[in-house]
Image (cartoon, rainbow, N blue to C red):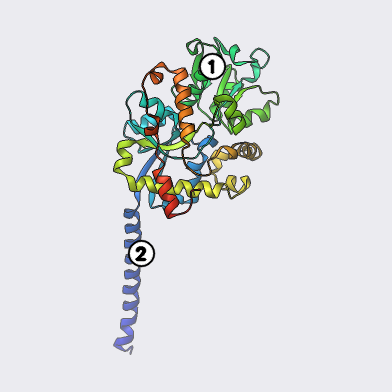
Amino acid sequence: MVPPAERRKPMKNTIARLAGALLALTLSTSLAAAQSKVTIAVGGGACLCYLPTVLAKQLGEYEKAGLNVDLVDLKGGSDALKAVLGGSADVVSGYFDHCVNLAAKKQELQAFVVYDRYPGLVLVVAPSHTADIKSIKDLAGKKVGVSAPGSSTDFFLKYLLKKNGLDPAGTAVIGVGLGATAVAAMEQGQIEAAVMLDPSVTVLQGSHKDLRILSDTRTQKDTLETFGGEYPGGALYSTVAWINGHEKETQALTNAMLATIAWLHSHSPEEIMAKMPDEMVGKNKDLYLAALKNTIPMFSETGKMDPKGADAVLAVFSVGSPEVANAKIDVSKTFTNKFVDQAKKTTGNAK
């Protein structure tokens, strides 16, 4: 006969296992509850200009910072902006110039961490029109693709047209997205030129060695030639009201982004590519890798906004938009470096 003490052992083991499972469930539930939910609208996730936003998710940096981040991929920066202004997203991963443009409409938006120190925008001629479009002036009356009307690609096009003595209204602007749809529109002759970003530019160059580029801002040299100074591109930004009401989340996003760009600049292009989702890399890994190598120099190393770069954005928009030129915008209110500075004090990720 089994002694009573021995009969109680299986019961004790079962209770111990149940208690352990319950404790684990409680801890995981508490951890999930402790994480703040943030929705980031991305102005075209496949574009390498937004790579740090996606890479942060792949590396688990948002989770490490105490955030449960949902990335919503949209067609262009203007759509991402609409998502935040409409309340369906909290933060935009998009180009800083929207903050300046919206300031003219009395909309208070603020960038709090910058991940692109150059915009990476490239004005490219469609392969079938290489012979007849040799300069920006030849775009008069032509159909030119942008990611979406009202996006940074559209602003860039209008600036170049105006700079070259053309009326932007005389060129038809067509939204074609940033990835495979833009490449298809160029190759199928739906448009005669387009403002594109990598990896799409490098993909086109892979198939068309004589591809004509009219303007390129992927490097410091090209950016300085185009704008006369450094010109910040991608950043995380939101409404001033959201930032003021969610300083903890804003700081966490900044910490995650700084950790990501530090990782990015300390690893090889091959290692970076290995972390990216397969659907973003695509089937031709060699072309994606070539595009990534072209893009890495444009990523910020500090996350900070250079006030001179913000001034350059205002100057560019003032050329192309009378509304911006006449608005007397205080550009210092369209960005803040306080969260990057705070991260530098606490984590040492910023330079």
Q: Residue tagged by mark 1?
A: 163
Q: Residues within 10 Å of mark 1 (few under 14, many from 20)?
A: some
| In the rendered image, the vertical position of residue 312 relative to residue 129, given as above or below | below
Q: In this rendered view, identify the residue nearer to me: 327 or 41.
A: 327
Asked where in the image residue 3 lies, by quadrant, the reply is bottom left
C-beta proximity under 8 Å, tags 2 and 1: no
Nearest to the observer: residue 255 or residue 10 = 255
Displayed quadrant of residue 180: top right
Report the Cα–Cα distance between label 2 and label 1.
Answer: 63 Å
Q: Secondary structure at mark 2?
A: helix
Q: Which mark is residue 191?
A: none
x then y, percent, for residue 73: 44, 35
**Relative image position of residue 41 (x, y in whole percent):** 41, 36
Q: Which residue sits furthest right?
A: 209
Residue at point 61%, 29% (across, down): 222
Q: Nearer the viewer, mark 2 or mark 1?
A: 1
Of callouts 2 and 1, the N-terminal one? 2
Left or right: where does residue 14 sit relative to residue 143?
A: left
Q: Looking at numbered disc 1 in the image, what kind of residue is underneath it?
A: Lys
Residue 332 picture location, percent across and down: 39, 33
Q: Residue at x 44, y 20 (%)?
A: 318
In the figure, residue 79 lies in which quadrant? top left
Tell me if residue 25 comes above or below residue 183 in the rendering: below
Question: Residue at horizontal 55%, vertical 47%?
Answer: 264
Query: Looking at the image, can residue 49 be seen?
Result: yes
Residue type of the residue flagged with mark 2: Ala
Label 2 packing within 10 angstroms: few (<14), some (14-19), many (20+): few
Q: Is residue 15 above or below residue 228?
A: below
Q: Is residue 44 visible?
A: no
State left or right for residue 208 relative to residue 163: right
Q: Which mark is residue 24?
A: 2
Residue 273, compared with residue 103, is above or below; it is below
